[in-house]
Image (spheres, helix red, strand yellow):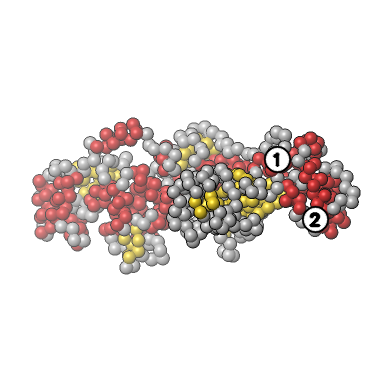
Amino acid sequence: MVLHHIDQDDQVTPGEVGISGLGLAAPLRLTEERRLPSEALFSGLDRLPHLYSRPGIAQQQTRCMRCGMALYGSPTAIRPPSFATGPVQVYNVRVVRSLRDCLTEYPHILLEAIADGWRISLTDEQFPEIVDRLVAEMTDREAIEATLQRLSDAEREALAFVAAKGQAKAHLLTRKYGHIRRLGPGRLEWEQAWQNPISPVERLWFLGLIYREYGVDDRYHGEMFFVPAEISANLPPMRAPLPAFRVETARQPSIIRDDQDALARDAFVILSHLRNHDVRARKGVLARHELATVRHRLIIQDPQRLRFLHHICEQAELICRKEGRWQPTRHAASWLKGEPLARRRTFYQAWLEDPNWNELCMMPSVRCENTGWRNDPILARQGILGYLRKCPPNAWLTITSFVESLHNVDPDFMRPDGDYDSWYIRDAQTGHYLMGYGNWGKVEGTFIRYLLEYPLLWLGVVAIGYPEREEDARSFMLTEQGAAILGLREVEASSSNNIREKERSLRHILVQPDFKVTVPLGASWYDRFLLERFARWVDERHGVAHYAIDSGSVRAAAKREVTVQQIHAFLRRVTGGRLPKQVLRALKSWASGDESPQ
């Protein structure tokens, strides 16, 4: 790609970069000459340039045709300019400083330090002459190799790390290879600090092999280190210590917990209860006595999960508060009519995008103090899920290796700025503050485990394995349905077709002469939801639900303005027309006030 500075009234010739959202015929490359406004790319070297280009274009590096300056583009979320006529993807274009630019910005004493490290003898040269000599020596391949031979293993490793990264976040580099003292020219000259560097990073700094700049990298905005292109192009092959994401496999666990669609089934119970009862909305959650009413029907009755169940139903817009009452929404009907996988994906997406459910402060091992700091739950979830997607489905993996791998590859997934001292979190047992990177395992490590063992388990994304005691989770598995929820794969067509064929013959609800109703596994959840308006739930075994119709349930439905004609029409439809005559006679009799079945 060719790019140059666009000034007012400049002509952009075919083959040069195009701009999307500005009314141009071609989003990326122009097919004819176009006159562009000066703001289109950038109007001067003194301003941070912005390249507007089509979404999905990878990071690109090029040079200006006029001055030879290196340009580096990476996507960012800056507001499009006012002159844009359509959607615009904005690219921050980082001006890559040359070695000469970097050296020119340094004070005289630091240039002397660099010259000393490269064993260049300076006499009475003026500043520009010193820069010229350094550039000539530091871009010479033989001189570079000679300098590298004098480095320690740790120093070469640090240099290889920065060169491989292109831009290395300052806190990641200094955390592993030591920091650089902030010394002014006077103190630097007085102490001759380059003679005794305190870390591998500082040694590279005093040799002029790495430089600082402010950069943007995905979620990070801050100080970064880089190797000038003139040096990196002449570096010999070096092994970069870039960690890879690896997770260890585990044995088949003795105890397995796989919630599958239990959360959705319990949500059905909540929706049905709210539809058929007058439930007041107090303090934003269902009252304890309301939960006690339906607790015997819930698959999992853990209090923490019940809180999550109610919250996710509200977050997914299945329930709402209206006139002081909890009620199912119109969206709930669509959810009930949907496919099983779609129902689970609805919950997963609602959880993923929820900024209010803060797992960090729900972990029992810590106590978060509200002193003004705030974490980002969405960012933390996305960070973990990005690596969960790299795990093979249907394979048992150790939780410990998953945590350790994230620690090695992306320790700052929850704190992109690398600040481990501003969150006021206490250890629940000792009361001590968990500040500093040394407490990563007690905060981030515990957080990863918590997400796997609780919300991701509840949502049916993973299964959890236990050796003996259920409190001691050791392994996890990304299930086939979980992989489908994450969008990694669709459920195998053959498997789905087999299930549909089996369920097709079992979708009709069976009403028996003794007024007992059997709802098969494949029946519509929405039909079952309507059935509960006039039938009394008895039990559920192996996914098959049993109900009973009696005078009390029919009269309760009549109070909710459900007529016998509606019940009759509904039962004829869901039974395929196979409705016992005595049941129809009993319905009419109960509606007229006769208590005895016919």
Residue 306 image offset from top left, x and y in percent: 41, 54
Residue 8 image offset from top left, x and y in percent: 56, 58
Q: Residue at x 59, y 40 (%)?
A: 405
Q: Quadrant of the N terminus?
A: top right
Q: Nearer the viewer, residue 141 or 447?
A: 141
Please give left or right for residue 259 compared with residue 516 in the image. Answer: right
Residue 35 image offset from top left, x and y in percent: 51, 54
Q: Residues within 10 Å of mark 2 (few under 14, many from 20)?
A: few
Kind of residue at disc 2? Pro
**To which residue does mark 1 refer?**
232
Tell me the quarter of the picture where residue 155 sits: top right
Q: Residue at x 17, y 48 (%)?
A: 571
Please give left or right for residue 506 compared with residue 245 in the image. Answer: left
Cα distance in 3D space between marks 2 and 1: 23 Å
| Sequence order check, earlier mark of 2 and 1 | 2
* Residue at the outermost bottom position: 323
For residue 518, say whether it is visible: yes
**To which residue does mark 2 refer?**
107
Disc 1 is placed on an element classified as helix
Disc 2 is placed on an element classified as loop
Q: Which mark is residue 420?
A: none
Tell me the quarter of the picture where residue 545 sits: top left
Kind of residue at disc 1? Ser
Q: Does 462 sit above or below residue 561?
A: above
Please give left or right for residue 330 compared with residue 405 in the image. Answer: left
Q: Residue at x 21, y 54 (%)?
A: 534
Q: Nearer the viewer, residue 427 or 20?
A: 20
Q: Nearer the viewer, residue 53 or 226?
A: 53
Q: Residue at x 56, y 40 (%)?
A: 402
